[in-house]
Image (spheres, rainbow, N blue to C red):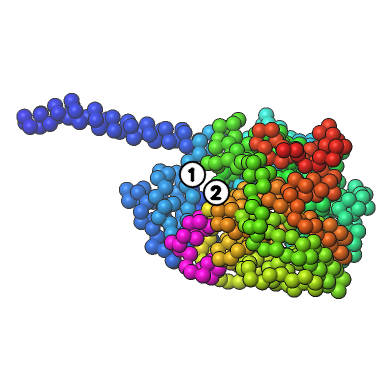
Amino acid sequence: MAGLKNDVGFSSINVTPDFKYAQNRYKAKKVRDYNMTHRVAVLDQDLCQPKKCGLECIKYCPVNKSGAECIVLNEESKKAQIDEDICNGCGICVKVCPFDAITIVNLASELATDKIHQYGANSFRLFKLPTPKKGGVVGLLGRNGMGKSTVVNILSGNLKPNLGRYENPPEWNEILKHYSGTELKQHFEKIEQKQIRASIKPQQIHHIAQAFDGTGKELLDKYDERGVSRELIKELGLENSMEQSLKELSGGELQRIAVAAATAKDAEFYFFDEPSSYNDVFQRTGVARVIQNLAKIGKSVMVVEHDLTLLDFLSDYIEVLYGEPGAYGIVSTILSTKIGINVFLDGYLPNENVRFRDKKFSFDVSSSTTDIFEEGNTIVTYPKLVKKYPTFSVTIEAGEVRKGEVLGIMGANALGKTTMMKMIAGVENPNSGSINKKIKIAYKPQYLQNDIDVEVISVLDKANGNPVEGSMEEEQILEPLKIKKLYNKSIKNLSGGELQKVAVASCLLQKVDLYALDEPSAFLDVEDRIAVAKFIQKFVRSFGKSAIIIDHDLQLMDLISDSIVIFEGESGVTGRATTPMRKAEAMNRFLKSLDMSFRRDERSLRPRVNKLESRLDKEQKTSGNFYYKH
Ligand code: ADP
Ligand code: ADP
Ligand code: MG
């Protein structure tokens, strides 16, 4: 009895309060978790391969160990399935998964009410929506996989938002209630009443060619509700492309015809999903002007674009999309173009107090303007080169590439840029002039072969000459380019951006003196473009190598080039290339031919495009300073 009494007494003094405390703490934690965070668990269905792993996520999950079923194998899909309600966010499954298939994120719980759409269990979800602006161009800026196309599909009425209830999607009256009191309510009312007139230029233009059996002219005639096809054909340089079947057109021609068709429709809302792909700088500028003209006549226009110069040039507002690619995306508040792009480069949204990248992208003036190269320290010298094809010829003035230097090549399409690179790389022989074959060159072609069923790792091993796993090159090249995660994917299953990064990495893995990269920005999102450009520059400089890069992204070329060759002439007929020029001189000449002027953003120091006919634009053009002074 005494013992019991003692026990009771003991417990009433010590154990019970402790126990109660623990219990309350547990409850409190639950309540706090519930109030503060909103768990997002996303599974990459392609990466999850339960047959090849030891089901580590299921084995090591502490919630599973405690007897609950947090991660299980879904019988139907044969993939892992995570219960977000009981997941404690420990992240052990993320670490133990050998294929990096799981993403777990804790989001502020107030976001839960901002969820617009979720595709399914453990799949991508979008929070908040941008608001279209009448008479203005709203640019959407963000990484791939953040939900830009999802936004376009929802706002154009092609995808009914489910507010996250993928199993039990709400009806329109509920959706409208959810948006009552917001600017978007009217927009959704119009969608519901099928009154919305939206026109979209989709991201994947090749689907248009597959779906439409006819010529460019026939396509444009079908959509020309505004009677503007003649002007559009002229502005977009499509005069010689209209009689061909869509299936025979080049990527650039098809893109511009798709832009023309979307523009010619009579709508209130216009959406352009990546309109610059495949086009050269001149064609991109033409596309930008056509899009801007829509806003000028009072239309609401939204554009998704990864070419920052173009986005800067054509947007009146920017909305940044941030989050975790493939897992979730959040739309920022609406910002001015200048602030929007700066915020994106900073990786920090002051209004939301959110840091979405741990470092900022900086534009260092000194490294881009001082001549750091010693005379005579050349990697390759080439004489005047001439190449003649039956219907095309190109003449290239003599030049050299120095150790540590990046030589940029710019110019319109079909002027012989790729031909020059191939001649230097020894893939094509010039008709006149010869190249010193002793230097070793690695070449990344413009068109990448993707129809091969080979694992990424074996392509990288081959380029490296040794297995890359655990190697120094892995640490130096593959980790910074974030390619490790792709090792076990097949080349044929990579997205365009992933394939491009693997191709760039395979080029840089080769032990050579000169790296020749033809359009490395193609298919890369805005963030990868900057990261890859900065990486190539650093790589070349720190290892005493050189690079020649062809690209149409002006911001990227400005960031990466030490000297520049400019191609001029008549596309598809004759090309002329200058000798390598100092960057400032070359950019000035190139911008002049584009009728575009640049200034530096006073805070981020990034190059900005002056709005056409603005005070600075006029002043700089009059004085001949198309490129900013430094
Ligand atoms: P972005 O245009 O920014 O690249 P998307 O809106 O196309 O992004 O896609 C965002 C994410 O949503 C991607 O991870 C994509 O795989 C996923 N997603 C898109 N459509 C679907 C769908 N119909 N079902 C499941 N997931 C989808
Ligand atoms: P760019 O890289 O500037 O777009 P290219 O060097 O690829 O230009 O091509 C320039 C011109 O040469 C194009 O009109 C193209 O059709 C033509 N051309 C390229 N390669 C060949 C070839 N092997 N045979 C015949 N014509 C070619
Ligand atoms: Mg997209």
Residues in magenta? Answer: 460-479
Residue with the mark numbered 2: 327
Q: Is mark 1 in CB contact (under 8 Å) with mark 2? A: yes
Kind of residue at disc 2: Ala
State the predominant SS element of the stretch in magenta.
helix
Q: Toward the viewer: 245 or 365?
A: 365
Q: Position of residue 115 (x, y in %)?
A: 58, 40
Residue at x 72%, y 58% (from the top left corner): 550
Q: How many marks?
A: 2
Q: Position of residue 420 (x, y in %)?
A: 75, 65
Q: Position of residue 536 (x, y in %)?
A: 60, 54
What residue sits 82% from the left and 53% below the top?
283
Q: For the residue labelled by badge 2, is the local secondary structure a helix, a strand or a loop? A: loop
Along the viewing direction, whichever of 622 and 335 lies nearer the viewer:
622
Image coords of residue 625 (percent x, y): 81, 40
Q: How dense is the environment of label 1, judged by Cα within 10 Å: few (below 14), some, or many (20 and up)? A: some
The residue under label 1 is 105
